[in-house]
Image (spheres, rainbow, N blue to C red):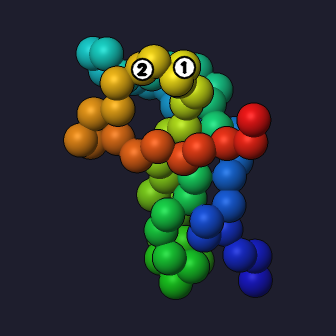
Amino acid sequence: MADYQWKTFWADLEPTRGSEQAGTRPVLVISSEAVNQALPIVTVLPLTTAGEERKIYPTEALLPGEK
């Protein structure tokens, strides 16, 4: 049984609506392994890069990378 939770993958996020980010993007799998194995879907968080001067909003989380 594969372990996908807390791993990153590239995903095609089409179709999108409104101002949602489109295209192939890195995502973090957050759904539990029990859910991942039982259902034909997984829950992911899309990841993006941001400059140091960019404001982080309350609905976002900053994951500092290596410098």
Residue 20 placement (x, y as % from top left) = 36, 22
Q: Residue at x 31, y 16 (%)?
A: 19
- Is 66 above or below relative to 44? above
Residue at disc 1, secondary structure: loop
Residue toward you, 3 or 56: 56
Q: Residue at x 75, y 76 (%)?
A: 2
| Residue 9 shows up from this direction | yes
- The single residue placed furthest to the left in the displayed view is 58
- Is 64 above or below relative to 19? below
Question: Which residue bears the numbered disc 2?
Answer: 54
- Amino acid on which disc 1 is placed: Gly
Residue at disc 2, secondary structure: loop
Residue toward you, 51 or 9: 51
Q: Are marks 1 and 2 in contact (CB under 8 Å)?
A: yes
| Residue 25, quarter of picture | top right
Q: Quadrant of the C terminus?
A: top right
Mark 2 closeness class: few <14, some 14–19, many ≥20 residues within 10 Å? few
Question: Which residue bears the numbered disc 1?
Answer: 51
- Is 18 above or below relative to 24? above
Residue toward you, 36 or 5: 5
